[in-house]
Amino acid sequence: MFKAPRTLTFKCAKCAKAVKVTVQKVSACSHITPYSGVCACGEVKLHAVGQPDAVQAYLASNGLWTHHH
């Protein structure tokens, strides 16, 4: 079974500094693994892996996403 890394690092889209995102706690679902973090400049970074429709909904949520079955 694939185990997602606890943290990932990306380049901030606003200031180009490194921003670390942390895996978020969700139910035991395997169809999405959401990550979020905040850059030192205040820019929120969201990332997710999994089913394309679930990932798209998470990224469009501006961090206000909730998981439903």
Image: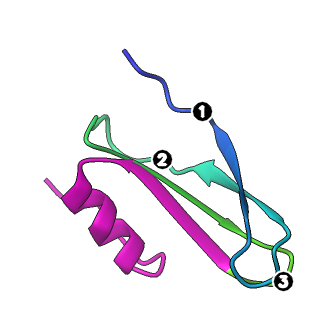
Q: Does the magenta stretch include residue 55?
A: yes
- Please give left or right for residue 18 compared with residue 44 in the image: right
Q: Mark 1 points at which residue?
A: 5
- For the residues labelled 1 and 2, say whether their Cβ atoms are less than 8 Å apart: no
Which tag, 3 or 1, sits closer to the chain's start? 1
Q: Name the residue under label 2.
A: 25
Give the spatial CA distance, label 2 vs label 3: 25 Å
Q: Which of marks 1 and 2 is in front?
A: 1
Image height check: is 69 above or below 14?
Answer: above
Q: Is mark 3 on a helix, strand or loop?
A: loop
Image quarter (top left, top right, bottom left or bottom right) of the N terminus: top left
Q: Is mark 2 on a helix, strand or loop?
A: loop
Identify which residue is drawn at 73% across, 72% down.
12
- Please give left or right for residue 64 compared with residue 44 in the image: left
Q: What element carries label 1?
A: loop
* Segment tinted magenta in the rendering: 44-69
Q: Name the residue under label 3.
A: 41
Which tag, 2 or 3, sits closer to the chain's start? 2
Identify which residue is drawn at 48% across, 47% down.
25
Identify which residue is drawn at 42% across, 78% down.
64
Identify which residue is drawn at 25% across, 42% down.
31
- Please give left or right for residue 23 compared with residue 33 in the image: right
Amino acid type for the residue under numbered disc 1: Pro
Q: Nearer the viewer, mark 2 or mark 3?
A: 3
Image height check: is 26 above or below 56?
Answer: above
- For the residues labelled 3 and 1, say whether their Cβ atoms are less than 8 Å apart: no
